[in-house]
Amino acid sequence: MPSICLQEFADAFGVTLDNLPDACISAYVRYMGDLSFDIIDGRQRDKVITDILKHIDADTQKIGAPERTVVWQEGWKENLDAFRSERNIESLRPKYYRPMNIMRWKGSFIQPHSPNFEMAYLAVFQKWLFSYFQPYDNVYEFGCGSGINLCEIARMYPEKRVFGSDFVPASVEIANELGKHYDNKITGFQFNMLEPDYERDILPNSVILTSGALEQLASKIQPFFDYLLDKKPALCVFAEPVIEVYNDESLLDVLAMKFHRKRGYTEGIIPWLRKKQDEGKLEILKIQRQYIGSKFFEGWTIIIWKPL
């Protein structure tokens, strides 16, 4: 019975086992029982591919359309109401995390055995990714959504100031509720990445995080990126769907690209950053594909860079 092992996490993160943080290893030990799966092949794999193609053909959702603002407000309002009622972290799980869904891992479609498979991977992933934040005094997450990252950051670093921003009010309310409930330094504020407010300064020695947020800008990334270059945070960490990492000779990757483009998710993140690096305006420190995602595409490619 295959299962994601600790070495595979290290490979996905682009590090050696010796360089995995202790917190990351502890999370793996805690959740390793949820990380087994079956590989989907043969006729079942053919059916998955057929279903994806049918879904893409019928899909009418368009990223960045005006009606999506209402959808996000209503979605995060569900999480806000659930958190106010239940007062637990589980209530912050975004509704698009659907237990037992078919996923993709290392070039194959897989069927997880546990309803907690994706959240278990996320728990290990967060401990590794957020280890980059250790040297900095403040963390800003733009597009903080349900607040699930804010919560983990604040638990790992109770001494840091943590800011969560989003363009819909319900998400900002979640961030402020988390600050009150856990008596830590989480603060929410509203911010539109398409029309950045340059009056909103970034504190010195700060790190910027986005996770599945740039994808929603429908490739209109320059205003936000220009804002970051102007404010010069110490580090920027993106965990996003990145179409440029796919291989057009891989069937699963071609399906992911087809889905990505049909929805209108953001393209051009890596080319933009490389262009600015060539101009001497920033330095790219890491680009790391995770090879994990939903049935349709991968959502957690890591890009780490800093303004110069």
Image (spheres, grey):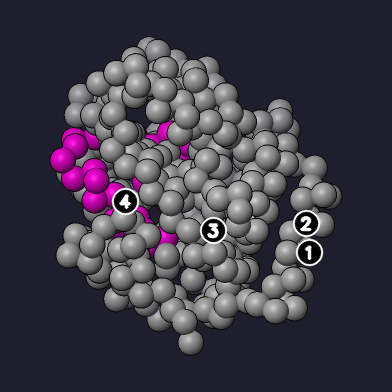
Distance between the Cα atoms at labels 3 and 4? 17 Å
Of marks 3 and 4, which one's residue comes earlier in the chain?
Answer: 4
Foreground disc of the pair 3, 2: 2
Distance between the Cα atoms at labels 3 and 2? 17 Å
User: What residue span does the magenta drawing correspond to?
Assistant: 122-150
Residue pointed to by mark 4: 129
Magenta stretch: includes residue 143: yes
Label number found at residue 293: 3
- Dot 2 lies on which element? helix
Residue pointed to by mark 1: 50
- Dot 4 lies on which element? helix
Residue pointed to by mark 2: 53
Q: Are marks 2 and 1 in contact (CB under 8 Å)?
A: yes
Distance between the Cα atoms at labels 1 and 4? 34 Å
Percent from the top left, x then y, of residue 224? 46, 22
Badge 3 amino acid: Gly
Of marks 3 and 2, which one's residue comes earlier in the chain?
Answer: 2
Badge 1 amino acid: Thr
